[in-house]
Image: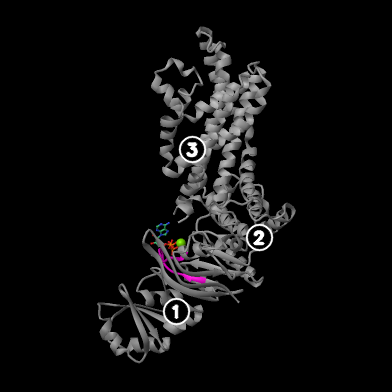
């Protein structure tokens, strides 16, 4: 049982699976990207500029500058989470794409690894699009920003794992609402995207340590604002540790779901 | 050479036995059929052959390889047409074939060439750049078969290839399948159309409730169990015992089907004359060639389709 759990049968064919997703993505990437960056842009204008006019500087920064790096992290998170819940589920349940793939030399684990790669891809693309926008707005203060996309990749893997675990545990399309309202939205609100957590009750501050987005926000904000130090490495290690811990679960759950 | 060897093959779903210890062999180049009603275990069986479902117990080798340990190698040489179409709706028609080809690591140029040939062969060349959901049911089925052939498989597995198609579309698929067989492809086919089975299959097994009831060539099975013809007669009342007793010697057997009795005559015309001499009221009578459907009916007391 436990041996099955850890035995992950991935081959180079994952690249063929990933390529399939890229072909689909490239068919309407303009629409995809413009919709996805529309929402963070709304936040940037409404909160960063509108509300920001009345807000005291945060951690010594104008509100817009504080907010922008947080939105990079959160839009990467949402892009991946949508892809690896709704997207994955539709491919599995309605389109039977997984079933078609595993009738070829592709294994179920290749399919799931392909989903993870796509999740990573989405995180990097959507995170980077926002980075480009805020760079143009002059909100990026440091060349360390070049390390942000790799960080988005690791974060993307984390959010992809989380999302597919949810998909594997509660494979019903109605239940994805709960994923977003019960998990993603609280993460979005209480991970330091909009305000430092220091003003909140100690309990919430402590709880934030368990939020993956909190660590991703810290990393992106550090890199974008050039506030770098050894503490960034610890943030990264937190993410990597959780990735390692979660890694076998989506494979196990989805295998159990699809292969009968 | 035997392409597929199954011994005491069992498939259970959470303790429910869908396939209950069946054994069969498929020879190279033949068309082998699984004929049976809904729930017989046809899909469960072929899914084990194409390494989708794990075998619960028993032995199963495909092309000399064990499905338990060499799934990828086996799948490389199979073509699979599943019961439900699972074409990729996010991709165009030609792209469906090309992306599928990439799962076999076929070189791009070669894949494109094969894909165009296949679209041509299945009469879909003019649809190459259409979206999949604009195709009709018959076209989708043909495209699914074309997709299964992209890797030039040694064995093509077809799970109900023509269910839901109109007669014309069905004949078109049959014609293509016959040509594939001529080219030496081993065909494995499940169906609950007895006509399909007798049109295409060299040998078949009749399945019901997870078990194999009979095995053989379609025509042999018919002559073994029924004979050449069937005389369907309807009696006024349930008097079949009495009548059948009187017809003793003229028939090899019979089957009661609702209001009707199917008589298996030695000679249809003679039986008809004999019946007309009898003092019974016959509601109707109908002499026709015997089919696999009748074999199935005799073996199970059930019809293949409702
Ligand atoms: N994934 C599954 N989980 C549980 N039971 C299943 C599953 N798939 C099939 N079964 C059961 O196994 C039995 C055989 O099903 P199978 O699909 O193999 O039949 P079939 O001969 O292909 O029927 P049909 O002609 O309807 O396609 C049925 O009783 C079915 O309910
Ligand atoms: Mg079936």
**Residue B262, above or below B136:** below
Mark 1 Cα shell of 10 Å, populated few (<14), some (14-19), many (≥20): some
Task: Verify CB contact (< 8 Å) between mark 1 and mark 3.
Answer: no
Closer to the eye: label 1 or 2: 2
Which residue is tagged 2? B151
Residue B57 belongs to the span the image colors magenta: no
Q: Which residue lies at the image location 65% right of the left edge and 72% below the top edge?
A: B182
Q: How many marks?
A: 3
Rendered-image quadrant of the C terminus of chain B: bottom left
Disc on the earlier residue, 1 or 2: 2
The answer, for residue A221, to whether it is visible in the render is yes
**Residue B296, above or below A36:** below
Which residue is tagged 3? A162
Which residue is tagged 1? B290
Identify the residue at the far right of this view: B109
Q: Quadrant of residue B294?
A: bottom left
Does label 2 lie on the same chain as label 1? yes
Q: Residue B146: x percent and y percent?
A: 62, 58
**Left or right: B90 as drawn, with respect to B208:** right
**Residue A103, above or below A80:** below
Distance from label 1 to label 2 (Cα)?
39 Å
Distance from label 2 to label 3 (Cα)?
36 Å
Circle 3 marks a residue in which chain? A
Circle 1 marks a residue in which chain? B
Of B9 and B270, the residue lying toward us:
B9
């Amino acid at each position: 049982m436990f041996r099955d759990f850890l035995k992950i049968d991935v081959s180079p064919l994952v690249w063929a699976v990933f390529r399939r997703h890229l072909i689909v993505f490239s068919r309407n990437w303009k629409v995809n990207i413009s919709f996805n960056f529309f929402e963070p842009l709304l936040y940037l204008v409404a909160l960063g500029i509108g509300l920001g006019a009345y807000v005291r500087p945060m951690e010594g920064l104008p509100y817009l500058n504080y907010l922008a790096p947080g939105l990079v992290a959160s839009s990467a998170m949402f892009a991946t989470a949508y892809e690896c819940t709704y997207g994955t589920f539709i491919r599995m349940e309605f389109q039977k794409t997984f079933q078609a793939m595993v009738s070829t030399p592709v294994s179920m684990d290749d399919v799931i690894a392909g989903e993870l790669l796509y999740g990573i891809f989405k995180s990097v693309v959507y995170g980077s699009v926002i980075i480009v926008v805020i760079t143009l707005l002059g909100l990026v203060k440091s060349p360390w920003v070049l390390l942000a996309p790799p960080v988005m990749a690791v974060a993307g893997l984390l959010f992809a794992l989380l999302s597919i675990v949810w998909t594997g545990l509660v494979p019903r399309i109605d239940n994805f609402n709960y994923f977003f309202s019960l998990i993603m939205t609280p993460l979005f609100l209480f991970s330091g995207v909009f305000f430092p957590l220091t003003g909140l009750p100690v309990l919430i501050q402590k709880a934030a340590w368990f939020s993956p987005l909190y660590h991703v926000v810290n990393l992106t904000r550090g890199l974008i604002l050039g506030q770098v130090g050894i503490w960034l490495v610890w943030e990264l290690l937190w993410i990597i540790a959780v990735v390692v811990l979660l890694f076998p679960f989506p494979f196990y759950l989805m295998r159990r779901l699809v292969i009968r | 050479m035997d392409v597929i060897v199954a011994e005491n093959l069992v498939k259970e779903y959470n303790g429910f036995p869908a396939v209950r210890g069946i054994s069969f062999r498929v020879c190279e180049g033949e068309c082998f059929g699984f004929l049976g009603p809904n729930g017989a275990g046809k899909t469960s069986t072929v899914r084990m052959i194409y390494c989708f479902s794990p075998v619960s117990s028993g032995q199963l080798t495909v092309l000399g390889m064990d499905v338990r340990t060499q799934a990828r190698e086996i799948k490389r040489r199979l073509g699979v047409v599943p019961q439900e179409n699972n074409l990729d709706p996010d991709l165009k028609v030609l792209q469906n074939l090309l992306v599928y080809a990439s799962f076999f690591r076929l070189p791009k140029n070669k894949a494109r060439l094969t894909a165009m040939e296949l679209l041509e062969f299945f009469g879909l060349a003019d649809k190459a750049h259409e979206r999949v959901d604009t195709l009709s049911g018959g076209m989708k089925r043909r495209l699914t078969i074309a997709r299964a052939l992209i890797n030039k498989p040694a064995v093509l597995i077809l799970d109900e290839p023509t269910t839901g198609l109109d007669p014309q579309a069905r004949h078109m698929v049959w014609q293509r399948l016959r040509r594939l067989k001529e080219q030496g492809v081993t065909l494995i086919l499940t169906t609950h159309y007895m006509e399909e089975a007798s049109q295409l299959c060299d040998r078949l097994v009749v399945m019901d409730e997870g078990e194999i009831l009979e095995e053989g060539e379609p025509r042999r099975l018919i002559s073994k169990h029924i004979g050449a013809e069937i005389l369907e007669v309807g009696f006024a009342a349930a008097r079949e015992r009495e009548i059948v007793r009187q017809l003793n010697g003229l028939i090899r057997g019979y089957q009661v089907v609702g209001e009707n009795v199917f008589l298996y005559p030695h000679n249809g015309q003679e039986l008809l004359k004999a019946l007309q001499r009898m003092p019974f009221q016959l509601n109707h009578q109908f002499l026709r060639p015997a089919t696999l459907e009748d074999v199935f009916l005799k073996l199970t007391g059930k019809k293949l389709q409702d």
